[in-house]
Structures are given as structure tokens and as C-alpha cells.
Amino acid sequence: MRWTDIEQIAADLAAQYPAAEPLTVDFTEIRDRAAALSAFSDDPARCNLRILESIQLAWLDRLDGIGRTD
């Protein structure tokens, strides 16, 4: 999995951290959590703010889609 696999990263983060509130996770933590996923094989330093924001929003959408309540 690479940084461009935003939806897959978001799905894996949602599965691994179901109780997390993506909007409260800072971007360095999102980077670290994504890079730690077992299927991740890209260079952790190759991401940027736009990618991390996209992952954060896709992660939030994924959790909202499974009936998470605030």
C-alpha cells in the first residue's frame, strides 16, 4: 500500500482504531499510524499535508458510514 491508496489506508485505520476520532488525531500521528499498517510499503517521508488531510477525511467518512455516533 502506498500514500496514494488513501481509501485503503482510511479503511485500515478505521478497522484498527474504531474508537478514534479522526479530527482529533494530528497529522504526524496519522502519518505514523498509516506507516505502521502491515500492508504499507511506501516511504513514510513521501507524504504531504494534502495526502494526510485526505486520509483524515476518508477515515472520518468511513467511520460515519458504519454508524458511529458522536
Image (spheres, rainbow, N blue to C red):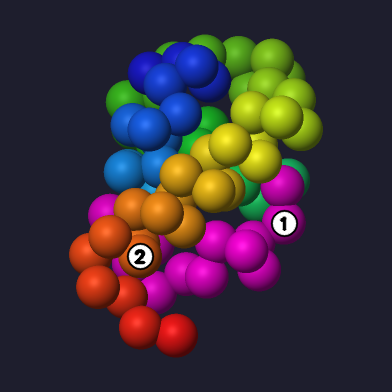
Q: Is residue 9 left or right of residue 51?
A: left
The residue at 76%/32% (across/down) is 49
Judge by depth and name the residue closer to the eye, 56 or 28. 56
Please tell me in which quadrant of the rendered image residue 48 appears: top right
Say above or below: 68 vs 15: below
The residue under label 2 is 64
Element at badge 2? helix
At label 2, the amino acid type is Asp
The residue at 32%/26% (across/down) is 39
Judge by depth and name the residue closer to the eye, 20 or 63. 63
Element at badge 1? loop
Exactly how many numbered labels are in the figure? 2
x, y (%) of residue 64? 35, 65
Say above or below: 36 vs 46: below
Judge by depth and name the residue closer to the eye, 7 or 17. 7
The residue at 39%/74% (across/down) is 19
Please tell me in which quadrant of the rendered image residue 24 appears: bottom right
Residue 26 — which label? 1
Judge by depth and name the residue closer to the eye, 15 or 49. 49
Magenta residue check for 5: no
Magenta residue check for 18: yes
Q: Which residues are magenta?
A: 15-27
The residue at 66%/51% (across/down) is 29
x, y (%) of residue 45? 72, 20
> Which of labels 2 and 1 is toward the front?
2
Can residue 50 be spotted in the picture? Answer: yes
Are discs 2 and 1 less than 8 Å apart at CB?
no
Can residue 36 be spotted in the picture? Answer: no
Say above or below: 13 vs 6: below
* Quadrant showing the N terminus: top left
* Quadrant showing the C terminus: bottom left
Q: Residues within 10 Å of mark 2 (few under 14, many from 20)?
A: few
